[in-house]
Every structure is written in C-alpha cells, then in structure tokens.
C-alpha cells in the first residue's frame, strides 16, 4: 500500500513476529517463548482488542454430565454442513487442556461451591460455558496472558504500531513493515510471522467490535498471496444495547442462557413463535427473528427482559452489563434492555491448516482472522475464545518445534517497492468511511438479495476508483483502503453464494442448497 526501501528504513530482527495482541496471538507467544525470541506488534495499546470485549465465556467440556461427542454434535449442527469434522473434534477434545494451561498461568474462572460455574448458551445441549468475573471472561483471559508476557524475557512488545504490509521473498514471508506516529516506518524481519489481528466488524455501521477491527490482517494476507475462505459468513450478534447515537455494547448471550427473554414494544414474548428453542436458538435465527419483529412492529429495536432475575444475582453475575446500562440510566432490575443485532464476528478469513499454517511459507494465522473449519456457516456461541486458545497453542507449538531444530539467524533482504500513486488532496476520508459502513449495514447485512448486493459492489467499486490508487501516510487512510477492499470481497462472496446457510441469508434464495453449495468459497490474489 505504500512505497518503501528496506535498505533505507530502520529495522528490527526477531525470531517470531506476532501481529496482534488478543488471546490467540498472546497464546502463540507464550508457546513460542519457550524456544525463541518473540516480538508482539499491537495496533493500539496491548489489550485493546475484541478479546477484551468478550463477555460470555469459553465453551469447553468439563462436566461429567457433558461429553465431547455432544459438543462436537452441537458445533456441527450450528455450522450447517460446512464445518470440518476433524477440526471440530480436535478443538473440542483439546479444549480442557487449554483451559488447564490458562489456569496454570493464573486465570481465575467463576466457581460455585468450589466447582467451575457452568452456564448454557444458544445451540448448546449442556451447560458448558465457563466464565470469569461474571461477564468479563475475555478480560480475565487477556490480563492473565499479559501478566505472563510482562514477566517473560523472551517476549518484547511494540504498542501503537500499525502493520502496513507483509514482506515476502520468493513466496515466503520474512516479516512486515510497521508504522508508528512518531517514528514512521520500521522493517521487522522474522523467521516466522503470525497474523492474529482479529476481525473486521468496523466495516459495518453497527458492531460490537473494537475500533481497531478494520480487517487489516485479512487484507495484508491477500496482498501477500494467501488464500481467503468463506468471507460471506459474517455473524451478527442478536443482542447489543441500542441507545440512539451511542456505540453498540454487547449484551451477552449468557443472559438468555440464564433466563432472559426477548419481548417486543408491546411487551409480548416473540421467540417461541419463531423457533422451538426460543431465546436459545442459534444466533442467526435469533438475529433474523429480531429483525422481523422490528419490521412487523415498525420499531427500531426490541427488549431483553431480565426483571424476573433477582437484582443481586444480576449485579454479581453481569457486572459489566449492569454498569453499562446504568450509565444510560437504565436499571435492568426494573426496566427491559433495548437491544438489536450488530455485526459481531467474521467466520471466514485466512485459510489455515491444522497447525495454523497459511499457504505462504513461514506465515501463520490464528484467532478471528483465520478460517480453520471449526465454525462452518454459523459459529456456536463461546467457541471463539476456545478456538483462539487451541489454535494459538497449535501455531505457537509448531513454530517452537521448527525453531528448536533450526538455529540459523534471521535473514534480511534488500527490498524496494515503488507505488505509482496519485495525490489525495481534498478527499473526505471520514465521509467515505461512514458511507461505506452504512452501505454494508444496509445492503450486505443480516438479509441479502441480488439487487442490494449488486448495488453494494457497484458503489464500493466507485469509491475504490479514487481511494485505492492513492498512497496514504497514516493508518486512517490505510484502514479505509483495507475496509474498502475487504467490503468488496464480502459483497462478492455473498453475491456468489446463491442460497441461505447459517449466517448468510439470501431472501431471494431462502433455502439451503446442499446439492450446489455445500462447499467453501475461496479467494486468492493470483498476481501476488
């Protein structure tokens, strides 16, 4: 995206470069640090990522009343024919070991009478969701890993560094170019590179995601030549706090698991008329049901009612939601919570194998950026942190094994890239960014059809004509280029898949079609 000459830029060499500081990247760092030097590059401060906003918990089989087979079956059913069964089995069976490792590092999960507290979420046949500090599970895991990393001499960190592009030589990744607002560009040379940059919820106007989730890692991987998969599958969380003019805040699915019900503006419970599992139906079903209820009542939102749950129980079990609602003068023990769906999770991403390897040598991906085959067409609630832990461990262990056998020094290369770019004077990037997010929400959101998808592709193409050929010198411009590029790929993929499956709902093709579409969609940059 920008011109550079590695012979003229300051450089850093490390054994392993990890781009991203969420649970997946940090877990990989912990594993690699046992054998080699690790450098973690974070776009914002360490800890500003989607992990910190994860409320519900981690799905893992730890009860005698539960079984691996049931968790596997639940995951496969949610994924609607597109999960990779071998991957699902491995992740589910390796989950308990990952949780024990976290607890060994100091993670404290909530307990009842000395036993880990387990709750249920939509699509799960048993209570198997562990949680920390009530509804702050992501924060508990993140802080545990950050505490370890702070004390680990083999791990270094760079905060507020934006990763612009990966560096490749002869089809092999050898590091990345990063940028800091005071220090400018720096080249990071590495034997192995891990992308753990998270998702892309910020391409939508309404999202639960951190402000930094602009899809940079997926776009970088594509430009470098990595294969992308299933980008049409974007999951929308059914319940986010709806206050006009305020950023959307997640209202965890676990509330419904513990008895919350959805009501419309007349106070009528509606989910039983849409699905036999009612509020505990899979997320895609609940999200679309809410949209239909909003449409039928002519209202901007519905309500999540927890007033029948004891007040003290709410304050202890859901302290974050309690305080967030209180900040908007909503006492959830007396008032129903206004909610509506928001973009939440990118199910597709960079294709990886069972060890987290992409099809570019020396490049790995783990966490939300990756497409492992675990989620299929619809992610089961609380399987995301599970995947991050298991695949972060897989990628880190594989890299550690490689470096244990290979002790050679990190190589550097004289790379010169010239970009023929026009000047961007007069462009209102903020206006284009907001217009893009609104377009994606309207035309490539929860419900899709050919006309709206075609309009979206055309509009994104129009904006791209005068944005993508410019060379910017700060993250705001680079983010917009990444968002435009990724939005186009999501819209193209959604347009190509002419069926309804999981989170991908086509009103003009409302049925699942296994004959033609029980398959993945792949995207690759053939010019890389």
Image (cartoon, rainbow, N blue to C red):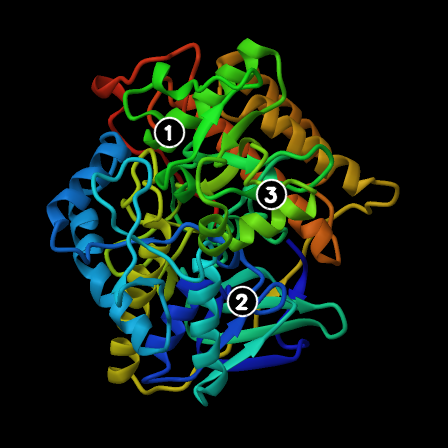
The location of residue 304, given as percent across then percent down, is 50, 32
Label 2, residues with CA under 10 Å away: few <14, some 14-19, many ≥20: many
Q: Secondary structure at mark 2?
A: strand
Identify the residue under disc 1: 279
Name the disc covering residue 176, or none: 2
| Residue holding disc 3 | 202
10 Å crowding of disc 1: few (<14), some (14-19), many (20+): many
Q: Residues within 10 Å of mark 3 (few under 14, many from 20)?
A: many
One can see residue 482 in this view:
yes
Q: How far apart, in angstroms, are the residues tagged by discs 3 and 2?
A: 23 Å
- Upstream in the sequence, badge 3 or badge 2? 2
Give the side of residue 448 with respect to residue 365, left or right.
right
- Examine the rendered structure and indicate whether residue 147 appears above or below residue 422: below
Examine the image and state in which quarter residue 330 appears.
top right
Q: Nearer the viewer, residue 444 or 122?
A: 122
Q: Is residue 417 left or right of residue 172?
A: right
Q: Earlier in the sequence, mark 1 or mark 3?
A: 3
Q: Earlier in the sequence, mark 2 or mark 1?
A: 2
Question: Residue 96, located in which quarter of the rendered image?
Answer: bottom left
Q: Could you tell me which residue is drawn at 44 percent across and 57 percent down?
A: 134
């Amino acid at each position: 995206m920008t011109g550079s000459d590695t012979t003229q830029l300051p450089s850093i060499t490390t054994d392993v470069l990890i781009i991203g500081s969420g649970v997946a990247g940090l877990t990989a760092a912990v594993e690699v640090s046992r054998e080699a030097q690790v450098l973690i590059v974070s776009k914002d401060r360490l800890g500003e990522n989607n992990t910190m906003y994860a409320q519900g918990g981690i799905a893992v089989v730890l009860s005698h009343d539960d079984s691996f087979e049931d968790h596997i079956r639940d995951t496969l059913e949610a994924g609607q024919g597109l999960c990779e069964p071998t991957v699902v089995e491995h992740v589910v069976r390796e989950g308990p070991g990952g949780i024990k490792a976290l607890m060994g590092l100091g993670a404290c999960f909530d307990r009842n009478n000395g036993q880990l507290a387990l709750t249920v979420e939509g699509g799960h046949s048993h209570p198997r969701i562990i949680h920390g500090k009530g509804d702050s599970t992501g924060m508990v895991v993140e802080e545990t890993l950050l505490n370890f990393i702070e004390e680990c001499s083999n791990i270094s960190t760079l905060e507020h560094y934006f990763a612009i592009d990966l560096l490749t030589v002869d089809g092999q990744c050898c590091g990345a170019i990063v940028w800091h607002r005071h220090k400018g560009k720096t080249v990071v040379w590495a034997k192995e590179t891990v992308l753990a940059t998270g998702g892309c919820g910020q391409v939508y106007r309404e999202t639960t995601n951190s402000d930094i989730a602009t899809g940079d890692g997926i776009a970088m991987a594509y430009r470098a030549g990595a294969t992308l998969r299933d980008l049409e599958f974007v999951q929308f969380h059914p319940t986010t706090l709806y206050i006009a003019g305020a950023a959307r805040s997640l209202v965890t699915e676990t509330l419904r698991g513990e008895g919350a019900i959805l009501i419309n503006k007349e106070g009528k419970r509606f989910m039983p008329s849409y699905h036999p599992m009612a509020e505990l139906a899979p997320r895609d079903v609940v999200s679309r049901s809410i949209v239909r209820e909003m449409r039928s009542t002519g209202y901007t939102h519905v309500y999540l009612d927890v007033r029948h749950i004891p007040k003290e129980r709410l304050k202890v079990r859901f302290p974050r939601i309690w305080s967030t609602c209180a900040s908007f003068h909503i006492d959830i023990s007396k008032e129903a919570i206004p909610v509506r769906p928001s973009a939440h999770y990118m199910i597709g991403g960079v294709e990886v194998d069972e060890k987290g390897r992409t099809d570019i040598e020396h490049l790995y991906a783990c966490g939300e950026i990756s497409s492992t085959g675990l989620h299929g067409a619809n992610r089961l609630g609380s399987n995301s942190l599970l995947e991050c832990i298991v695949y972060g461990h897989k990628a880190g262990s594989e890299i550690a094994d490689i470096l244990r056998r290979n002790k050679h020094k990190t190589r550097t290369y004289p790379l010169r890239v010239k970009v023929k770019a026009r000047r961007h004077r007069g462009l209102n990037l903020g206006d284009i960014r907001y217009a893009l997010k609104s377009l994606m929400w309207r035309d490539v959101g929860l419900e899709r059809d050919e006309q709206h998808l075609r309009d979206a592709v055309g509009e994104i193409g129009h904006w791209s004509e005068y944005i993508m050929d410019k060379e910017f010198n700060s993250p705001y411009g680079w983010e917009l280029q990444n968002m435009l590029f990724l939005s186009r790929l999501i819209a193209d993929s959604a347009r190509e898949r002419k069926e309804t499956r999981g989170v991908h709902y086509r009103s003009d093709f409302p049925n699942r079609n296994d004959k033609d579409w029980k398959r993945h969609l792949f995207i690759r940059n053939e010019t890389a």
